[in-house]
Amino acid sequence: MIHAENLTKRFKETLAVDDLSLDVAEGEVFGFLGPNGAGKTTTVRMLASLIAPTQGTAKVAGFILGRQDTDIRRTVGVLTETPGMYDNLSAEYNLRIFAELCEVKDVPGQIEKYLKMLGLWERRFDAAGTFSKGMKQKLAIARALLHEPRILFLDEPTAGLDPESAHLVREFIIELKKQGRTIFLCTHNLDEADHLCDRVGVFKTRLLVVDTPAKLRSSVFGRKVIFHLRVADDGMAEYVRKLAFVRDVKVVENKLVITLDDPEKCNPEVTRVLVAAGADIQFVGELRHSLEDVYLQLVKSA
């Protein structure tokens, strides 16, 4: 659905996006993670055909960037981090202007559909300037969806929202995915990315890594299984350390913290070895690193 190859953007002496090659599948929620100034918004603007790349190529929904830009713009919806609204105009009129620009066929029907879905229908005649930040964000999401885009670029869709509004937006993203939409999500909320995204890319001018959140956790830190024993000592650790599939073993109080690539496969063998060595196993758990831990490690080492 999205294919970028060696996409680069330079503003005078500033290299904003460096040699980006990326594929996003149809119906995928793809998280694009990176610090402020990393080039995420610039990437979105290029892929949405709002600015031209300095070099490189891209296809969006089969349309070629730089040749079929009008088709790309008709195919995508974009929610910017700070969406501008005409504050003196009503919510309904704000959407009507955009719908007519996008040549939406059933303007009243589409406006009603999305204002109701986002809980704004009763406020449709109120000036957008009277809306809270959360309401304005929901209005901007409705605007991005009026023309039923196949691909949706969301730049910090829950930034600054209260918990209830943020939850509504996240549930709305899940519903859009169920409809088969492709969603390119830029966010600093790593718990949100972990919950919503099929895959994530960590980006800092260059793309550092792309994978599922689970595989990134495993590749960066390994998976750590904690065996709680009645008594744990270096002798017990040594028995486990001899197993070829064990990457690391640490003794922490009465626990063995064992790094494994595939705990589901390896835990039974570790258990047998410990029992044979006379260990009293009280229970077994897994130490899980957050996506935030992974992100910070990758960005720090970039």
Image (cartoon, rainbow, N blue to C red):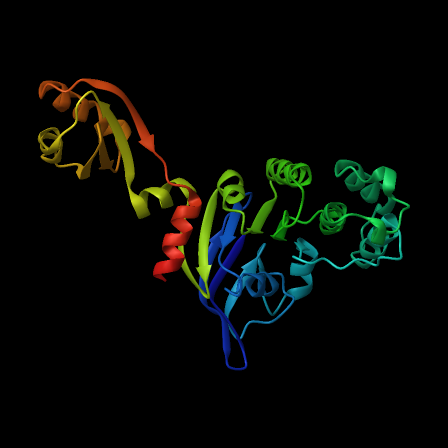
Give the quadrant of the C terminus: bottom left
x and y percentages locating residue 63 in the rendered image: 60, 60
Compare residues 18 and 132 and report the one nearer the observer: 132
Compare residues 167 and 23 and report the one nearer the observer: 167
Q: Which quadrant would residue 117 be assigned to in this image?
A: top right
From what the image shows, is residue 287 above or below residue 110?
above
From what the image shows, is residue 241 above or below residue 16?
above
- Left or right of 115? Residue 47 is left
- Left or right of 63? Residue 219 is left
x and y percentages locating residue 295 in the rendered image: 42, 51
Q: How many marks?
A: 0
x and y percentages locating residue 94 in the rendered image: 84, 54
x and y percentages locating residue 219 in the rendered image: 31, 46
Residue shown at 39% from the left, 40% from the top: 214
From what the image shows, is residue 156 above or below residue 38?
above
Q: Residue furthest front?
A: 253
Residue shown at 76% from the left, 45% from the top: 135
